[in-house]
Image (spheres, rainbow, N blue to C red):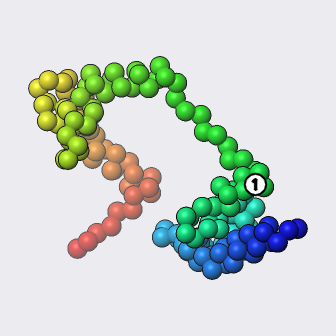
Amino acid sequence: MNRYTLSALTLAVVAALSAGHALAFDASAPKTREQVKAELAEAIRTGDIVVNGETGQKANELFPGRYPAKPVVEGKTREQVKAELAEAIRTGDIVVDQESGKKANELFPGRYPAKPVAQGKTREQVKTELAEAVRTGQMPLVSTY
């Protein structure tokens, strides 16, 4: 193993260990030590870890031949994109004011067809559903008084 490869690998491991807590952070739920170790091992295996702090490049970007290729996500065809654009123009669902981010159908609602409104349930339907949920135990009846 040449000196450059050894230095790059050492740097990757040091960066991974020093940034381990940042990689493990998840606001929704804390991760276990084993999960963090598994994520770190996977990041090192795939090269998905920053090795150049100045540029922010990851190991798999600097040395793509050393790591497995990432799966390619299939995009849309040209015809699909053209059809989506035509539909957006027809319905005014396209941004026309860059500053506010407003769409054409928001600025000029009279020029475009109205968006269909979902039909809601009647009060009686909601009451019936609630009674059924309470009866089956899906919604416990709780008194607040």
Residue 44 falls in which quadrant of the image?
bottom right
Mark 1 is surrounded, within 10 Å at the Cα level, by few (under 14), some (14 to 19) or many (20 or more) other residues, namely: some
In-image side of 79 versus 49 (left or right): left
Element marked by disc 1: loop
In-image side of 64 versus 136 (left or right): right
- The amino acid at mark 1 is Tyr
Residue at (25, 37) in percent of width and height: 95
- Residue to which mark 1 is pinned: 67
| Residue 137 position in % (x across, y down) | 44, 57
How many discs appear? 1
Q: Is residue 9 visible?
A: no
Residue 55 falls in which quadrant of the image?
bottom right
| Residue 2 position in % (x across, y down) | 85, 68
Q: Quadrant of the N terminus?
A: bottom right
Residue 113 falls in which quadrant of the image?
top left
88 shown above or below 125: above
| Residue 130 position in % (x across, y down) | 33, 50
Residue at (55, 33) in percent of width and height: 75
Residue at (60, 39) in percent of width and height: 73
Residue placed most toward the observer, 110 or 67: 67
46 shown above or below 117: below
